[in-house]
Image (cartoon, rainbow, N blue to C red):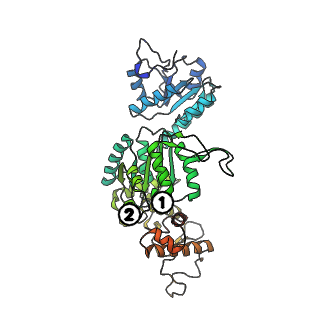
Amino acid sequence: MSQKTNLAGIKPENKKLYCDNSDDKGHPLNALWLDPFAPPSALHKQALQQASINLLSVSTLEQLKKVLNETQLVVIRIKEDASLYDEVLELVNSIKIRLPIICRIDRNDFELGIQIMQKGAFHVLASDCVKVQDWIDVAKKIVEKQNNKNTYVFVDNESKKLLSLAEKVAEADVTTLITGPTGSGKEVLARVLHDASSRYSRPFISINCGAIPENLMEDLLFGHEKGAFTGAIKEHRGVFEQADTGTLFLDEIGELPPNLQTKLLRVLQERNITRLGANNQTKVDFRLIAATNKDLKKAIEDREFREDLYFRISTFRLSIASLSNRPGDILPLAANIISRTAKNFVNLSDEAQNKLLTYHWPGNVRELDNVIQRALVICQGSLIKKEDLIFDDLPTHELVQSSGGNQTNKQTIIDKLPDENYSSTNSNSPMNEDVPALNLDDAVRHSEYLTIQSAIRSTKNRNDAAKVLGISPRTLRYKIAQLKNFEPKQFSFE
């Protein structure tokens, strides 16, 4: 039977998708079995039954749509090409149901298997596979995926409005620019856009443009051919290729070097890339989501960012507010962090909740995550008290005493570098002999931080600051990114 038949043309009289329906209601997973070539064998039925997978049957398109609402996975037989996979995926996406697709492929068709996996298939098995354990492993992966879905918190009214707008933008599949302060959850919003789009089952590739040296950035984006340069012992697919058919998230896009801004603009216009050392172009199809915490319009005025690239990446703009401006999210986010990281059940006392709600959260959600994780280390028992909450802007070298049961008293030291006005000769210094001094690496980083911060504050823009410091603008961006990543929220260049 030909596999070229369009699924939309299924009719009882001319098409039969061989399936079987088990009467056992105890199976936790329902599976739609699509095989245009043969019905499931007795050995397949037995293996699936032992793996707790129940087969459902259809014979018309309407029945197929109904069954898709009742199933947890689709098992399809692929032969010769990926056309049936594409049709099934399109149908699943059209009715907005997210289902893992398992592909059965002949053992000698290795290349087709690779192609299917690149298209986003959940799993690939040999078409004659009847091993019970293999199907059990598939079922376990599906259950794990169901139990570990991304959890997003949009409780505050402002967040609900943003989520509603994001869902509409996701369906439009347009290039999107997300703006918001550092740590506010821009990557989380990007994942919402991906998960709510028709590309949800395809790759989501994320990179931080400000954390990668310029000499490595081009290779990371475009990839290279074997032998393109010394050390290129094998070919490498860049993120443009890795994100093909899926979503590419470029965080801190304002830090992208000018020459790469030009190349990114060309990729977005032509949808073709050329690997380093290659002569041929490769066509790519990805959705771009960019994010920044800086004012790109000001960056354009300062000639740090291309105006034409700005208009290319900002087809639609989404702005995420700081955590202090969406207080309704604070406690739900805290509960989510606790459930994600705590081994045992832990709750927040009323006083602790009030302390979280009245704090100004300069570090946004990232700082909240830090605060909750510290509290989980410090708290005794299953209740986080207000004394267990240590914020990033507390005085330098805050000492936290904790004791319990028969445990020996211990000190938890929150190490923060001194501020700009700190002097080793200052008699009011909070340092004392009981607290360990900064190690050499920390001292060097802090000295570099003060120098860079002073240059930035005394000049009009970062290009001028780089000239004062005697380094290139790219080197300045790289050093700032290093300092930001050294200790979350320890350094601020806002």
Residue at left offset 58%, top offset 77%: 435
Image coords of residue 180 (percent x, y): 39, 58
Q: Secondary structure at mark 1?
A: helix
Q: Is residue 189 left or right of residue 400?
A: left
- Residue 253 position, x and y percent, is 46, 56
Contact (Cβ within 8 Å) of mark 1 with mark 2: no
Query: Label 1 crowding class (10 Å Cα cut-off): few <14, some 14-19, many 20+?
Result: many
Question: Is tag 1's residue or tag 2's residue first in the polypeptide sequence?
Answer: 1
Above or below, 221 against 487 in this view is above
Q: Mark 1 to mark 2: distance in Å? A: 15 Å
The residue at 55%/76% (across/down) is 447
Residue at 54% from the left image edge and 71% from the top image edge: 415
Q: Answer yes or no: is residue 398 visible.
A: no
- Depicted 426 relative to depicted 158: above or below: below
What residue is drawn where x is 46% and y is 27%? 87
> In the image, residue 72 lies at what x, y percent?
47, 31
Picture quadrant of residue 482:
bottom right
Reading the image, the residue beneath label 2 is 301
Extreme residue in the top direction: 13
Mark 1 or 2: in front is: 2
Q: Secondary structure at mark 2?
A: helix
Q: Position of residue 280 (x, y in %)?
A: 57, 40
Report the residue that reaches farthest toward the front: 279
Q: Is residue 235 visible?
A: yes
Q: How many C-alpha atoms fall within 10 Å of the one at disc 2: few (<14), some, or many (≥20)?
A: few
Residue type for callout 1: Glu
Kind of residue indicated by mark 2: Glu
Residue occupied by mark 1: 255
